[in-house]
Image (cartoon, rainbow, N blue to C red):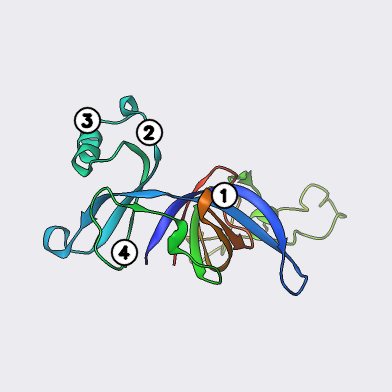
Amino acid sequence: MPGLLGKKIGMTSVFSAEGKNIPCTVIEVGPCVVTQVKTVETDGYDALQLGFGEQKAKHCTKPELGHFEKAGVTPKRYLAEFKGFEGEHKAGDVITVDMFTESDFVDVVGVSKGKGYQGVVKRHGFGGVGQSTHGQDDRLRAPGSVGACSYPAKVFKGMRMAGQMGNKQVTVQNLQVIKVIPEHNLIMLKGSIPGSKGSIISIEK
């Protein structure tokens, strides 16, 4: 699906025509520059490679510098591919937030906030033992049994245990576009999106 790269600014709220207070996420979307046009003849599929954010040339490798020079654009910090764009595009074209309109529904892909190493109660919502007597004072948040004793005599893959929580790619679908502010490259989406302030996300129609 066609989309753009952006940066999460933060959250706010707006009032609807009915007087309801709607929580919104503000995102700086684009402008994104086309750094490569992929076609079925050359790459086996149709897509546009978009670049977002400026990057100093000294922080790029020589192949990256050659790639940007071939496209006729300045070095970009983030690159991503999107399919489904309508019309003809060529390297160097700029795509702005104008491609979105109010009342559109979009999917947002981002990396969730990292929570570190967490137990099963916080990570998976376990209820805990629920008994603080009979020597169980230090086992309130323990996971309990995780496998059989004789057969199959192993712990199955995917068993919910303590471990790293967050810091994973998350997709939130069907978020409504509340407002588009093209003069500032901003878009307001209903609800929250994954990631912290300043994190890079992609928005797809």
Label disc, if present, on residue 31 of the rendered structure: none
Marks 1 and 3, the one that precedes in the sequence: 3
Q: Which residue is mark 3?
A: 62
Q: Quadrant of the C terminus?
A: bottom left
Q: Secondary structure at mark 2?
A: loop
**Residue type of the residue flagged with mark 2:** Gln
Q: CA distance from mark 3 to mark 2?
A: 14 Å
Q: Which residue is mark 4?
A: 83
Q: Which residue is mark 1?
A: 195
**Residue type of the residue flagged with mark 4:** Lys
Marks 3 and 2, the one that precedes in the sequence: 2
**Residue type of the residue flagged with mark 3:** Lys
Q: How many marks?
A: 4
Q: Specify whether 118 is left or right of 73.
A: right
Marks 4 and 1, the one that precedes in the sequence: 4
Q: CA distance from mark 1 to mark 3?
A: 31 Å
Q: Nearer the viewer, mark 4 or mark 1?
A: 4
**Residue type of the residue flagged with mark 1:** Gly
Label 2: how many Cα within 10 Å (few below 14, some 14–19, many 20+): few
Marks 4 and 3, the one that precedes in the sequence: 3
Label 3: how many Cα within 10 Å (few below 14, some 14–19, many 20+): few
Q: Is residue 168 visible?
A: no
Determine contact: label 2, label 4, CB under 8 Å: no
Q: Nearer the viewer, mark 1 or mark 3?
A: 3
Q: Specify whether 48 is left or right of 203.
A: left
